[in-house]
Image (spheres, coloured by chain):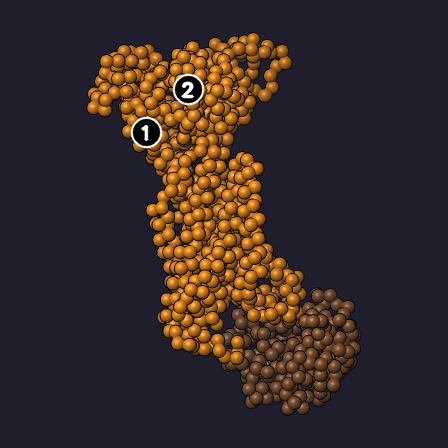
């Protein structure tokens, strides 16, 4: 199994007491499988994604990627996990503003020492960014920037891709086009995809769907 | 992995070259001022060392209080087995200036002195057989091309303004036949030699040569320079700190992304440290090179100061000294480390999910202001405690440093309060927005404004000190130099004839006779003073017992200068041990510009205690219209050279010239520090310009033109600079008080009254406004031309 989440719980400090954001979540994802994570705002979708990516530590439960339990990893180990095993596509793109499109796409693959120039060129081409390769993020539209973020996530061919509302900042038509491309490329690389979305329409395009409500699987 | 991360970090600088330039230039300027001052100090100290080595370094010497040693005494000591080497020393006056001539005996001189003779190209006998030979540096040799002097051999590494020759030749050239200045004592002496008191009871042993005293005397001057260098460095560090903090804030989203993409926090911190180290090395090299230029430009003035004020020999040219190059690099690295420590600490602890938005504005939080206030309070308390309980020069500078830092930290809170009051009083919407927006901008500008405050306060403080000093010094010169003409005869016999000749032509002839002697364990001058109204009416007494002049004339009391009185805590009524017996202290007088202790004794008592005293100097009281006639008569009848007759006006003019030159360096450093502060404002405004757009765009969208916004930005900078100037005045005055009442007393031994110079403040205020105006002009022009599309981006959801 590519990803196994077992009985995961997480709380944040709040007023008057801690707010339980994840409450005993369990899920499994196989390689090549795509899973949509839906739920209302504040249901814990993004937090779950952050815990799976090793960016947030759970209060209880375990996340296992392949044979590796994340709780056994230190900061360095979790950083390595994000470099080599899990790629995250953020809603806010999080591109590096001082690098051009080509450098941004190649960036994570270079960090993981998995840079493949041909594959990066193919990705750039397939994402429709070839003519923008020398441009900087600030010169691109929102849709273009999100395509760069997808390219960056897939350039190192990671086993698992996590996408946090990747079309949240885009209009419907652009969002659809971006999702089409993402699903197509994820499928080609054989990676597993866990995507957070508000949209039932988009969720329906993935192989499975999990609905969260108040930190629990509904 | 690291290469990829490093390329991402560096790409920021490629895209923002100006920010990189400000960072490098800020650090380079800070390093330049610091290392420039250090270069000057190093050069001067090297000169002292060379001069010290030339005359025996730290070896013990035998001297005779109040006079020279008879050659017969030297021969008696040698015969008794004493391993001593004679030195004859004096000033050789040539048309090109004076040179210190040191006569040595090459056969008995210690190795470090005798080594000078290794440049001799012929027989050693040429050195001591008339006409003999002089050995000097190339620069000094130029001043010794006089037909009446022996030929000069040029030697590398010789101290400036110094020439060696054989002792016999030196005695002839200096008119000191049969006399010796001092005897250098060898480290190893035969066990069986008789005690010094048995052979030469009038000689005393001193543990080190005169140049050690010189180093002691000039230490305070160098400490002052070092303090100024440190202040400039601190001002520079404000730029670096600001530039680094802003660069880190701007790259915060990138750091977060790097961490999210899998770069460990440790690696990120290490990469940033490496990046900063590279900057420090580049800026250090640039700074040291700039410092060299500053030092080379200022050194001639410093050399003149040290020669004029302390008689310290310093060559006006700068030599390459690897030690201060290394020190310059070290200070650049240390400065970068100090300026970036806080930012690096934050990065090292940056959580992966930290807010990605730059938080420069979040620094405005009340908590930061309170923290700054607390730190300012602690520093002010430290400063106060140092005033109350500390002593010494270092304590004085600690007090100054704490005081200045406290004032700087207090600035944002005061400005914030003033702006809040202004906002409350604003009538129009635009004015309300202006004040509120200015207040919001404060955190981003406060570092630059602190730098400006420090520069302005230093300017006011040092300016007030120098002007107060000059005013007091001028008045003091008028009191002290009462005689119309000062003459020096060639010999005692000529002096006697001259006095007889001058008797009918003058109102009074006042002897100016003095000896150098040890007083209370330190070198001092003892002057004989005649019983005359000139002294009774004019001498600048600070405190005195009743009938002091009668007691001095009777040889029962002495006057001491302020520096000696402060050092030894002497007040009228105390006693003081002098060569020849103890006397009562009758009074204390001010004696500005003199590094030595000085004692005034009745002239008869001086002659009784020091029968060999040279009696060639006199001050003449005469009507000014008779001045030229007396001068002409002395030249005609006694062949007195012009240099031996100096009128009061010439001495005053010379003294003021020395004074003004002394503070040329201070003035130059003042201007440089202000320039650095102006640069700090420019860099802050330019760096903030991009971050200002989200704040200015709404105002633009609501109907203000870009030109209006630009004018408001310009006005804001001017207003903040003006407020800072107003606050700098009291800080500067406190600084001046500390300099006059604490630092000067510790460094020089005299205290000066403080005067206020509001016109100077007005000029400085205008300069500050010009600096701030120039600094804000470019960002304002940029703002007035910013494309509307860029302002519109602020409102798009792509941000």
The structure residue drawn at horizontal position 52% and vertical position 79%, both measured from the top left corner, is B797
Q: Image quarter for residue B715?
A: bottom left
Image vertical order of residue B675 relative to residue B249, above or below: above
Image vertical order of residue B680 relative to residue B526, above or below: below
Image vertical order of residue B404 relative to residue B747, above or below: below
Image vertical order of residue B363 relative to residue B335, above or below: below
Q: Could you classify mark 2 by the number of other residues whose Cα lies within 10 Å: few (under 14), some (14-19), or many (20 or more)?
A: few
Q: Does residue A135 appear to the left or right of B605 in the view shown?
A: right
The structure residue drawn at horizontal position 48% and vertical position 20%, both measured from the top left corner, is B573
Element at label 1: helix
Name the foreground residue: B209 vs B127: B209
* Mark drawn on residue B546: 2
Residue where numbered disc 1 is placed: B478
Q: Position of residue B233 (x, y in %)?
A: 49, 49
Question: Is residue B644 in sight in this rendering?
Answer: no
Mark 1 or 2 closer to N-term?
Answer: 1
Name the foreground residue: B685 vs A119: B685
Chain at numbered mark 2: B
Q: Are marks 1 and 2 in contact (CB under 8 Å)?
A: no
Element at label 2: loop
The structure residue drawn at horizontal position 54% and vertical position 43%, both measured from the top left corner, is B383
Q: Position of residue B187 (x, y in %)?
A: 59, 21
Q: CA distance from mark 1 to mark 2?
A: 24 Å
Chain at numbered mark 1: B
Q: Does residue A67 appear to the left or right of B75 in the view shown?
A: right
Q: Position of residue B1 (x, y in %)?
A: 64, 67
The structure residue drawn at horizontal position 41% and vertical position 12%, both measured from the top left corner, is B554
Of badges 1 and 2, the one in the foreground is 2
The letter of the orange chain is: B
Name the foreground residue: B778 vs B8: B778
The letter of the brown chain is: A
């Amino acid at each position: 199994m590519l990803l196994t989440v077992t009985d995961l719980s997480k709380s944040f400090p709040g007023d008057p007491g801690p707010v339980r954001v994840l409450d005993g979540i369990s899920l499994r994802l196989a390689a090549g499988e795509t899973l949509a994570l839906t739920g209302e705002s504040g249901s814990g979708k993004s937090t779950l994604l952050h815990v799976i990516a090793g960016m947030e530590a759970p209060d209880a439960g375990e996340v296992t990627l392949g044979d590796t339990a994340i709780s056994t990893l230190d900061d360095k180990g979790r950083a390595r996990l994000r470099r080599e095993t899990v790629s995250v596509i953020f809603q806010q793109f999080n591109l590096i503003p001082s690098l051009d499109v080509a450098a941004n796409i190649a960036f994570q693959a270079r960090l993981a020492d998995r840079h493949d120039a041909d594959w990066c060129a193919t990705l750039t081409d397939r994402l429709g960014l070839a003519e923008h390769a020398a441009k900087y993020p600030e010169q691109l539209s929102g849709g273009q920037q999100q395509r760069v973020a997808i390219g960056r996530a897939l350039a190192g061919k990671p086993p698992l891709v996590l996408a946090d509302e990747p079309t949240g900042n885009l209009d419907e038509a652009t969002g659809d086009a971006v999702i089409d491309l993402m699903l197509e490329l994820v499928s080609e690389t054989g990676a597993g995809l866990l995507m957070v979305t508000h949209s039932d329409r988009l969720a329906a395009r993935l192989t499975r769907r999990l609905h969260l409500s108040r930190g629990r699987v509904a | 992995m690291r290469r990829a991360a490093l390329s991402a970090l560096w790409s920021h600088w490629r895209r923002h070259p100006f920010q990189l330039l400000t960072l490098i230039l800020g650090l380079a300027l800070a390093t330049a001022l610091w290392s420039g001052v250090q270069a000057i100090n190093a050069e001067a100290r090297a000169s002292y060392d060379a001069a010290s080595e030339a005359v025996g370094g730290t070896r013990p010497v035998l001297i005779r209080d109040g006079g020279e040693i008879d050659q017969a005494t030297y021969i008696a000591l040698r015969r008794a087995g004493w391993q001593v080497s004679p030195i004859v020393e004096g000033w050789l006056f040539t048309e090109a200036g004076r040179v210190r001539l040191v006569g040595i005996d090459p056969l008995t001189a210690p190795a470090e002195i005798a080594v000078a003779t290794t440049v001799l190209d012929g027989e050693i006998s040429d050195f001591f057989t008339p006409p003999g030979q002089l050995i000097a540096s190339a620069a000094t040799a130029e001043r010794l091309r006089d037909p009446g002097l022996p030929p000069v051999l040029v030697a590398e590494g010789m101290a400036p303004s110094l020439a060696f020759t054989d002792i016999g030749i030196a005695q002839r050239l200096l008119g000191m036949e049969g006399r010796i200045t001092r005897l250098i004592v060898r480290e190893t002496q035969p066990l069986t030699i008789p005690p010094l008191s048995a052979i030469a009871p009038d000689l005393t042993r001193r543990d080190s040569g005169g140049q050690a005293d010189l180093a002691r005397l000039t230490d305070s001057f160098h400490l002052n320079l070092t303090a100024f260098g440190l202040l400039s460095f601190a001002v520079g560090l404000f730029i670096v700190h600001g530039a680094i903090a802003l660069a880190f804030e701007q790259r915060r989203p990138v750091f977060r992304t790097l961490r999210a993409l899998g770069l460990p926090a440790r690696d990120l911190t290490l990469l940033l440290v490496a990046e900063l180290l590279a900057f420090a090395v580049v800026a250090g090299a640039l700074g040291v090179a700039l410092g060299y230029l500053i030092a080379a430009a200022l050194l001639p003035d410093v050399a003149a100061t040290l020669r004029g004020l302390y008689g310290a020999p310093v060559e006006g040219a700068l030599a390459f000294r690897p030690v201060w190059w290394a020190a310059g690099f070290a200070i650049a690295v240390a400065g970068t480390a100090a300026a970036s420590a806080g930012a690096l600490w934050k990065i090292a602890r940056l959580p992966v999910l930290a807010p990605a938005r730059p938080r420069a504005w979040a620094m405005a939080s009340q908590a930061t202001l309170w923290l700054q206030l607390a730190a300012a309070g602690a520093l002010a308390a430290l400063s106060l405690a140092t005033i109350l309980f500390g002593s010494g020069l270092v304590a004085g500078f600690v007090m100054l440093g704490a005081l200045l830092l406290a004032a700087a930290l207090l600035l944002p809170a005061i400005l914030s309060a003033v702006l809040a009051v202004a906002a409350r009083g604003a009538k129009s919407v635009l004015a309300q927005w202006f004040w509120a927006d200015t207040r919001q901008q404060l955190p981003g500008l406060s570092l630059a404004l602190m730098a400006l405050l420090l520069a302005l306060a230093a300017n006011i403080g040092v300016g007030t000190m120098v002007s107060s000093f000059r005013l007091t010094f001028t008045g003091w010169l008028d009191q002290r130099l009462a005689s119309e003409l000062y003459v020096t005869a060639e010999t005692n016999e000529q002096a006697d004839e001259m006095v007889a000749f001058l008797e009918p032509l003058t109102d009074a002839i006042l002897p100016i006779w003095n000896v150098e002697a040890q007083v209370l364990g330190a070198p001092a001058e003892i002057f004989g003073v005649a019983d005359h109204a000139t002294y009774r009416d004019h001498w600048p007494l600070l405190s005195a017992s009743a009938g002091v002049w009668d007691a001095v004339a009777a040889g029962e009391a002495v006057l001491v200068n302020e520096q000696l009185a402060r050092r030894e805590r002497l007040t009228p009524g105390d006693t003081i041990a002098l060569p020849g017996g103890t006397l009562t202290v009758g009074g204390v007088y001010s004696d500005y510009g003199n590094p030595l202790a000085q004692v005034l004794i009745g002239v008869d008592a001086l002659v009784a205690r020091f029968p060999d005293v040279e009696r060639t100097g006199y001050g003449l009281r005469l009507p000014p219209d008779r001045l030229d006639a007396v001068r002409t008569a002395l030249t005609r009848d006694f062949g007195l050279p012009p240099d031996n007759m100096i009128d009061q006006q010439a001495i005053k003019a010379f003294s003021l010239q020395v004074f003004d030159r002394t503070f040329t360096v201070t003035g130059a450093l003042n201007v440089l520090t202000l320039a650095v502060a102006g640069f700090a404002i420019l860099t802050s405004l330019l760096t903030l310009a991009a971050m200002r757009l989200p704040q200015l765009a709404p105002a633009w969208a609501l109907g203000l033109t870009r030109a209006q916004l630009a004018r408001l930005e310009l006005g804001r900078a001017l207003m903040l600079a003006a407020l800072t100037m107003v606050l700098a005045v009291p800080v500067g005055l406190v600084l001046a008080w500390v300099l006059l009442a604490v630092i000067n007393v510790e460094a020089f031994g005299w205290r000066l009254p403080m005067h206020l110079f509001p016109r100077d403040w007005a000029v400085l205020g205008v300069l500050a406004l010009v600096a701030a105006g120039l600094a804000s002009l470019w960002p304002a022009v940029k703002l007035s031309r910013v494309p509307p599309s860029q302002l519109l981006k602020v409102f798009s959801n792509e941000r």
